[in-house]
Amino acid sequence: MPRGYGGVAILWKKNLDKLVTTLPIGNERIQCIELSGNQQKLYIYIYLSPLSSSNFKLRLKYELPCRNSEVQKQSISNKVKWNKTDKDKYKSLIEEGIALLKDKPQNPTELDEAFVTLNHTITKATVAVAPKKKTKKKKKKLQIMTENIFQAISKKKIAFFKWKQNCRPSDPNNSYTLQKKMTTSSLQKQCRIEVALHKIQERQKIIDTGYNDSLLFYSLIKKQRGKLSRFIEELTVKEELFLSPENVMKGWNKHFGDLAKKSNNTSFDTKYLKSVEKEAFKICKDKYIHQEISNEEIKKAVSKLNTNKAEDFNGVTAEYFIHGSESLLLYLQQLFALNSVTYLLKIGTLFQMYKNKGDIKNDKKI
């Protein structure tokens, strides 16, 4: 910073290094840090000249990436119970949607657009006929149980029992009604106090174990962040950072695409190898005779699909095609006639699967 210029800096204790993330945004007069915890907080420090007005207005624009769980919301959140759906109505809706689609695609780009439109048509028809799941109101559970909370619950139950035995009086000035309200209020107050104390103890434990026990430190951080820590919001591939779910998918594509590439070998002539591969591909393409798929073959293949399986990346299951109409299978036949595989059929989901036997650390990522 040049001499004579004002600036700003942020200082914190050394034992908080693992909780603080410095952000590259800003300059000498604007500094930003992010503090991890139960709620991630963003601190922005701005230098203002002492000659400036006390009513100095600031305008801040900061783009926050959406949570993976918020972006990737499927249009059908619950599993469809096909035994309770109107299959005839589903077939008619599919036929109406197929009739509005474009003709046979002529190139891979049109094929990709056709599959996207087909997925939208199938999903829209399924939403229209799928029975809506009844939402149950879940009772709130206690976040923590201590001796003080246990005693408050006992007092509340005793007060409620006495109020019930005396014919449930509705008079607000009745002694049993007042006692019931007081014990309920006391229980709620005690729960808030114990939860606050528990959070303070957890944060202090994180600070104390920052340098002594790294495993305990990261386990506490993961526990504090909750279920949202399981979602991938950022991905680094060869020092390139990908943010947001859409860009994360591009990062995975780049990562696995680089793995599929052949490594440079000094003992081989790579230019000659590429020319040979190109020529071999051209020969195979010229000699290849495309055998068209008949409608009967598609029907037979669809009938052999396994049911009650997980949905794909686009939220489509085998039942969508099994219970579909004849026009849906005919449209699939037209899409397969182009002799090209769309990128939508290549996208998969990545999750961790543990074996039933053996060590839990011996897992497979599929």
Image (cartoon, rainbow, N blue to C red):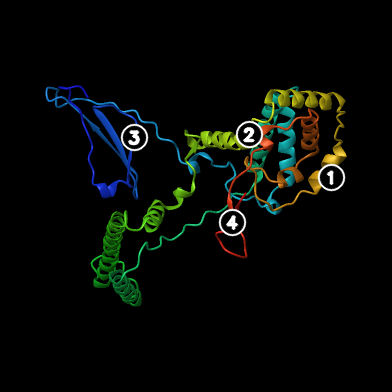
In three-dimensional space, the C-alpha distance between marks 4 and 1, rounded to whole angstroms, equals 36 Å
Q: Is 203 positioned to the left or the right of 325 in the image?
A: left
Locate residue 260, reporting x and y percent: 65, 36
Secondary structure at badge 3 equals: loop
Q: Which residue is mark 1?
A: 300
Q: Is residue 251 visible?
A: yes
Instruction: Write down the residue under mark 2.
Output: 263
Crowdedness near tag 4: few (<14), some (14–19) or many (≥20) residues, C-alpha within 10 Å = few
Mark 2 → mark 3, Cα distance in angstroms: 36 Å
Separation (CA) of disc 4 from disc 3: 35 Å
| Label pair 1/2, CB-CB below 8 angstroms | no
Q: Residue at x 58, y 33 (%)?
A: 254
Q: Residues within 10 Å of mark 1 (few under 14, many from 20)?
A: few
Residue denoted by label 4: 363
Q: Is residue 48 above or below residue 81?
A: above
Q: Amino acid at mark 2?
A: Ser
**Residue at image x 39%, y 54%?**
218
Q: Is the N terminus in the top left, top right, bottom left or bottom right quadrant?
A: top left
- The first of marks 4 and 3 along the sequence is 3
> Is tag 1's residue or tag 2's residue first in the polypeptide sequence?
2
Relative placement, left or right, of 360 versus 138 is right
Is 258 on the left or on the right of 58, as rendered?
right
Label 3 sits on residue:
23
Residue shown at the point (87%, 28%) measured from the top left? 289
